[in-house]
Image (cartoon, helix red, strand yellow):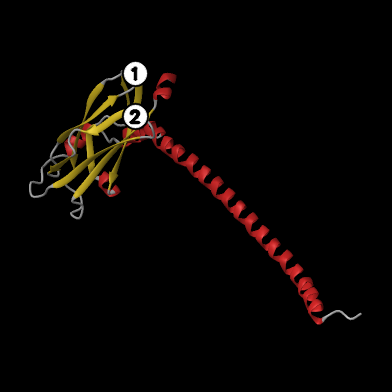
Amino acid sequence: MTKPISDVAANAAATISKPRSAGSNASTAEANSHAIDLRHDNRVTLGKLLLIVPVMLMFCASLVPLYKQICAVLGITSQRAIAQNTQVDLSRLVKVDFIAHLNNTFAWNFEPVEKHVDVHPGAIVTVNYRVTNTLPYATTGRAVPSFAPMEAGLYFNKIECFCFSNQTLQAGETRDMPVTFFVANKLPEEIGAIALSYTFFNVTNDAKKT
């Protein structure tokens, strides 16, 4: 008996649609697998970056002994800096901003007493930073300076500074730490402001080893 034309058409449509459905499922599965791999790669990359940042910061702090040796070899001392300070440029003022940072979760309070000063190039100036150990036991920190713009660091001469040396504070102790400096007369005219920033690192464990 001959099947109705409608039944034949329905069977043909069902036969054609089956391969298409399988191909669609395969494409979806491949896309999902690619998305999972991409998320995994992103997590791995983020983990590596989170490990690199603290390593770089600790590397900067570990350069302190090398920095001191280079200064000694080149004769960069406070006495030499004062000797070169032969005159003050009263025709010009430079704004110096003071900034304080703590590395990671270092539990100290750290801030500049003077937020900024206007100085004449060649004039010797003293400002203070204030630090408080908020922990119930003694801890040791070490400060590393930086400048903005970076070029300004070539003309910023520190005569007295608490940086690059261990500072041990007892529980609850507050200390004012001076920075005595002058800005060299040769500071380029286009630099009208300098930012001096200190970052304190927790070196308590390193201090205990020495």
Quarter holding the N terminus?
bottom right
Q: Is residue 134 above or below residue 82?
A: above
Crowding around mark 1 (Cα neighbors within 10 Å: few <14, some 14 to 19, many 20+) is: few
Q: Position of residue 5 (x, y in %)?
A: 81, 82
Q: 65 or 38, which lies in front?
A: 38
Q: Tag 1's secondary structure?
A: loop
Q: How many marks?
A: 2
Quadrant in which the C terminus is drawn: top left
Q: Nearer the viewer, mark 2 or mark 1?
A: 1
Res 85 seen here: yes
Q: Is residue 189 left or right of residue 24?
A: left
Q: Residue 73's spot in the image, x, y percent?
A: 34, 34
Q: Nearer the viewer, residue 47 or 14?
A: 14
Q: Is residue 175 shown above or below 100?
A: above
Going from N to C along the chain, the mark reached first, 2 or 1, is 1
Residue 189 position (above or below residue 44): below
In the picture of the structure, the residue carrying the numbered disc 1 is 136
Tag 2's secondary structure? strand
Q: CA–CA distance between discs 2 and 1?
A: 19 Å
Tag shown at residue 142 = 2
Q: Residue at x 27, y 20 (%)?
A: 173
User: Percent x, y for residue 29?
Assistant: 67, 58
Disc 2 residue crowd, few under 14, some 14–19, many 20+, Cα 10 Å: many
Residue drawn 67% across and 63% down?
A: 27
